[in-house]
Image: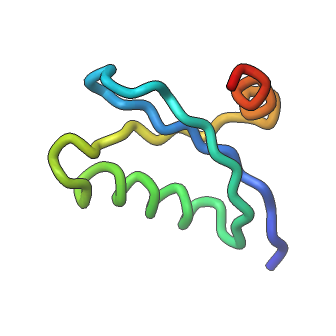
Amino acid sequence: MKAQDIYIRLTDPTGKHKPVVNQHRVWDHDRFVANQQRQYGEAAKPGDERLVTVVNRDDYTAYRKGN
């Protein structure tokens, strides 16, 4: 298995918090995304829910330059 970079955007569905884009180095892309969706969805405490979307490196770079 080969490690790869993945970029994830976490968006607050209530709009209280700004979206966040993070970079992760993962072994299994699909497994990681499923775990992130579970962590920020069904397993999240009320108020800590986030929508998890996979974005590309350009989105990550634009986010970093904007902060």
Residue 36 in picture, x, y percent from top left: 45, 57
Residue at position x 15%, y 46% in the image? 46
Number of numbered discs present? 0
Quadrant in the picture for the N terminus: bottom right
**Picture coordinates of residue 31 (x, y %)?**
54, 66
Q: Quadrant of residue 35?
A: bottom left
Using the image as rendered, state which of residue 31 and residue 57 is in the foreground: 57
Q: Residue lying furthest left in this view? A: 46
**Residue 22 lies in quadrant:** top right
Q: Is residue 37 above or below residue 61?
A: below
Compared with 57, 16 (above or below) is above
Here the colouring is rainbow
Place residue 42 in its image quadrant: bottom left
Residue placed at 38% from the left, 27% from the top?
17
Q: Residue at x 60, y 43 (%)?
A: 8
Residue 9 location in percent, x, y?
56, 37
Position of 36 with respect to 62 (left or right) is left
Relative to the observer, which residue lies in front, 31 or 43?
43
63 vs 45, left or right, is right
- The outermost residue toward the front is 67
Q: Nearer the viewer, residue 35 or 24?
A: 24
Q: Nearer the viewer, residue 13 or 18?
A: 18
Question: Residue at horizontal 81%, vertical 70%?
Answer: 3
Measured from the top left, where is residue 67 in percent x and y? 68, 26
Q: Please say if 12 is above or below 34.
A: above
Residue reaching furthest bottom?
1
* Residue 27 falls left or right of residue 42: right
